[in-house]
């Protein structure tokens, strides 16, 4: 039976690992890549997608086109059973878990964002991690211009025309530069907005931007952004945020309806559920990129802390979370798995950066290439040329080149295209006999019965004893979602034609925080299972009990 290698994640680390494995092993192994989307996102181009110089569909490539000889599974990873060598996923419209076996597992899931130390930022800030984030930013900026064009309220107009980016790293600098260019090129079409009314800010906690680059280049970038009309607030953090204001660490209150946060990297919940060793919030690996304590699990990319030297901990010498390093890490992981399968020892990851590039908007950039500093238009041209060459697939390169060429010739489109999203609170109808969910299904909603009736069945895992309960109008079920659980413990089906109200966890917690009667009704149940509802002065605690649904 062929060796099964499963890769989790379809970003730079995961996609290039799967491709390198397919080239090395061919039909000698079964290679499967699992990703939540069926496409590869070229992350460095997200700021340009957010600014409208590239169409969203042109910054992505279908994974099935890129990965010949690799099985691609569009699914969400829920957990990993390392003892049984099984990845548990939810795929398609199924709520039932699916088990995917592996002999070697590669984890390249990237990182999430944690804004918990800055109240309100999670609720009101836009992010720049996914294609949807970039698309949403463009739609949001255009919406602010449309609103400022027609409002008669000075305060509202000031807030709509103030755009704030938090974080002065590569992503923040490139985002603020591209956003300013979008604004400048759009203003001629808004007769009621004077350019002097537009305010764009970059907030950075460190004393300078682009800490990853030489000071000379950071100074050039600072000067360019300021000439371009962008205010830099250096040595300044974020204290809190609302839907109309940002409060900085020095107490300044900025009226703004646009906050883009490019800070706060944190491990994804699925990584935490795996129980792997973590260091500095990332999966701990040795120099061969093998997870510490495991012989068949590997990790790379943003989610892994990869030492570049044997004494990396003392020297703080770890691989940076960049595409340049992820591509090289992928080749090393593929080579090491191949070596292990042939009975050889894996090699160590060793790579020295060739430099760094950053686009600043307005056809200017900065570049550090083999120790040589380049600024201005030449750096911007090198930036575009390098990433164009790195784009996977000739079709993608051609489409991006066409986008860039058209962008040089005319105005950017101001069309707003909104995508449909399932309402977080909605009515759902079930016929008598319909299954609502089964034990083991993914927890995907909290249910309240409006009319009809449902039956809940629970089987004791120890004794096998089955208990049932009928829930009628006004009753509710599915509380495990609120407790933070990802899987159901009970099975529920409709015994009459039934109408229910379904809400997501976030909406439930909002109601609990806002309405005292609602909070008081659920408090005894939640406290019984070790969870404190919002509004009671205590933080939520993990789901460590065994609630009934």
Image (spheres, rainbow, N blue to C red):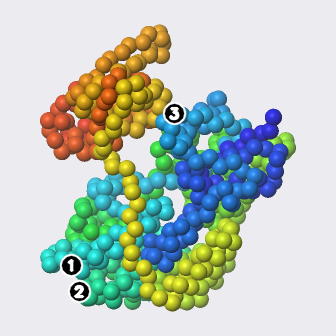
Query: Where residue 248 appears, x then y in whole percent?
Result: 27, 67
- Which SS class for mark 2? loop
Q: Quadrant of residue 262?
A: bottom left
**Which of the pair 65/196 is nearer the observer?**
65
Q: Earlier in the sequence, mark 2 or mark 3?
A: 3
As measured in the structure, the alpha-carbon distance from the residue carrying label 2 to the one carrying label 1 is: 8 Å
Q: Are marks 2 and 1 in contact (CB under 8 Å)?
A: yes
**Which of the pair 326/294 is nearer the observer?**
326
Residue at screen point 55% across, 89% down: 377
Q: Quadrant of residue 295?
A: top right
Q: Are marks 2 and 3 in contact (CB under 8 Å)?
A: no
Q: Which residue is mark 2?
A: 192
Q: Is residue 112 left or right of residue 542?
A: right
Residue at screen point 42% across, 35% down: 443
Locate the C terminus and report the quarter of the image it occupies.
top left
Q: Is residue 463 left or right of residue 16?
A: left
Q: Which residue is mark 3?
A: 96
Residue 150 image label = 1
């Amino acid at each position: 039976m062929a060796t099964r290698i499963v890769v989790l994640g379809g970003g730079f680390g995961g996609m290039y690992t799967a491709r390198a494995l397919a080239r090395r092993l061919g039909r000698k192994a079964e290679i499967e890549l699992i990703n939540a989307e069926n496409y590869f996102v070229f992350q460095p181009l997200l700021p340009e997608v957010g600014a409208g110089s590239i169409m969203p569909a042109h910054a992505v490539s279908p994974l099935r086109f890129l990965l010949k000889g690799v099985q691609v599974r569009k699914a969400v990873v829920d957990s990993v059973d390392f003892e049984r060598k099984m990845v548990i996923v939810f795929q398609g419209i199924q709520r039932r878990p699916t088990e995917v076996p592996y002999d070697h597992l590669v984890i390249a899931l990237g990182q999430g964002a944690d804004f918990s130390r800055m109240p309100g930022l999670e609720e009101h800030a836009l992010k720049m991690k996914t294609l949807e984030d970039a698309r949403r930013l463009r739609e949001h900026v255009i919406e602010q211009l449309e609103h400022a064009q027609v409002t008669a309220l000075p305060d509202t107009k000031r807030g709509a025309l103030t755009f704030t980016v938090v974080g002065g790293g590569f992503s923040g600098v490139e985002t603020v530069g591209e956003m300013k260019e979008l604004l400048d090129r759009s203003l001629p079409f808004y007769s009621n907005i004077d350019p002097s009314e537009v305010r764009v800010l970059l907030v950075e906690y460190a004393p300078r931007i682009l800490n990853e680059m030489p000071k000379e280049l950071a100074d050039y970038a600072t000067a360019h952004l300021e000439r371009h009309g962008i205010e830099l607030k250096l040595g300044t953090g974020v204290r809190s945020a609302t839907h109309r204001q940002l409060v900085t660490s020095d107490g300044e209150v900025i009226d703004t309806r646009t906050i883009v946060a490019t800070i706060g990297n944190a491990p994804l919940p699925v990584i935490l559920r795996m129980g792997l060793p973590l260091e500095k919030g990332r999966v701990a690996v040795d120099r061969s990129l093998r997870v510490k304590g495991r012989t068949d699990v590997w990790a790379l990319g943003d989610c892994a802390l990869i030492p570049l030297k044997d004494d990396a901990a003392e020297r703080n010498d770890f691989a940076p979370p960049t595409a340049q390093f992820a591509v090289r890490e992928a080749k090393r992981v593929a080579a090491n798995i191949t070596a292990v399968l042939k009975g050889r020892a894996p090699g160590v990851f060793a790579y020295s950066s060739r430099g760094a590039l950053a686009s600043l908007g307005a056809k200017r950039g900065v570049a550090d290439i083999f120790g040589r500093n380049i600024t201005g238009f030449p750096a911007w041209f090198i930036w575009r040329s390098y990433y164009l060459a790195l784009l996977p697939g000739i079709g993608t390169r051609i489409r991006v080149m066409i986008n860039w060429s058209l962008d040089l010739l005319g105005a950017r489109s101001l069309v707003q295209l909104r995508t449909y999203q399932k309402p977080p609170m909605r009515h759902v109808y079930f016929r008598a006999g319909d299954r609502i969910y089964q034990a083991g299904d993914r927890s995907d909603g909290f249910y309240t019965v409006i009319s009809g009736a449902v039956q809940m069945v629970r089987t004791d895992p120890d004794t096998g004893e089955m208990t049932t309960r009928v829930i009628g109008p006004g009753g509710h079920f599915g509380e495990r979602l609120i407790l933070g659980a990802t899987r159901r413990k009970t099975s529920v089906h409709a015994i009459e034609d039934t109408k229910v109200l379904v809400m997501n966890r976030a909406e439930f917690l909002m109601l609990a925080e806002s309405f005292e009667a609602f909070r008081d009704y659920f408090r005894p149940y939640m406290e019984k299972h070790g969870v404190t509802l919002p509004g009671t002065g205590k933080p939520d605690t993990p789901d460590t009990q065994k609630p009934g649904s």
